Amino acid sequence: MSNRTAKITRETAETNITTQLDLDGSGNYEIATGVGFFDHMLSHIARHGYFDLVVQADGDLEVDAHHTVEDVGIVLGQALNEAVGDKRGMVRFGLAACPMDEALVTAALDFGGRAHLSYQLNLPAARIGQFDTELVREFFAALTANAGLSLHLTQQAGINTHHIIESAFKSFARALDQATQLDPRSENVPSTKGQL
């Protein structure tokens, strides 16, 4: 099995971000973005996806968290794209629905090389602590665009904004874990085109 890891650094006038990712990890993480709720959500990606993940971000939080959250999505998407390589032997598709109390969000994804986000979350609260909940969509939009994956996040139930977002991140993690698994039945690229 090839080494399915990546380390990406991105530095702009607004943020300085380094991400390390190991697809075949055990759920270990070191995350520090300066945005507490966002750190909590990123930890779910690592723990429930069984990825080893390091995210260090220094952003212009004196403005707001927008640039930090979006740029972490960019960098994590680039890391995913690099770590999967040519996707040879990879399952490619993932589907998961992880409840969080009354909330339930389904995540379905395809590592097909074409970026698409279908975002169907209804978040009642505009903020959780200091976190603007509209940034959830910005994060997933940046991630899907840079990872080259199609992601459908569909809310089935939920009235508590924290629970809805947490269900979305956990479901995404589980679906991503499925999609990035290596299928013992094949060493081919999972496409009739022969490449993704």
Image (tube, helix red, strand yellow):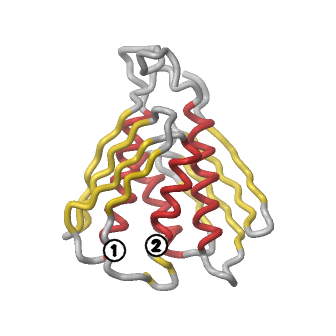
Disc 1 packing (10 Å; few <14; some 14–19; many ≥20): some
Q: Position of residue 2 (x, y in %)?
A: 59, 24
Write the residue at 33% across / 65% down. 121
Q: How many marks?
A: 2
Q: Which mark is residue 89?
A: none
Write the residue at 49% across / 45% down. 51
Q: Residue 180, located in which quarter of the rendered image? A: top left
Quarter of the N terminus within the rendering: top right
Write the residue at 70% across / 47% down. 8
Q: Which mark is residue 134?
A: 2
Q: Secondary structure at mark 1?
A: loop
Residue type highlighted by circle 1: Leu
Q: Compared with residue 123, is residue 17 higher up or lower down, i.e. above or below?
A: above
Label 2 or label 1, whichever comes before in sequence order: 1
Left or right of 181? Residue 28 is: right
Q: Compared with residue 6, is residue 65 higher up or lower down, i.e. above or below?
A: below
Q: Position of residue 44 (x, y in %)?
A: 43, 59
Q: Compared with residue 10, is residue 69 higher up or lower down, i.e. above or below?
A: below
Marks 2 & 1, CB-CB < 8 Å contact = yes
Left or right of 125? Residue 3 is: right
Q: Which mark is residue 123?
A: 1
Q: Position of residue 59 (x, y in %)?
A: 70, 71
Q: Nearer the viewer, residue 136 or 44?
A: 136
Q: Position of residue 151 (x, y in %)?
A: 40, 47
Q: Secondary structure at mark 2?
A: loop
Left or right of 95? Residue 151 is: right
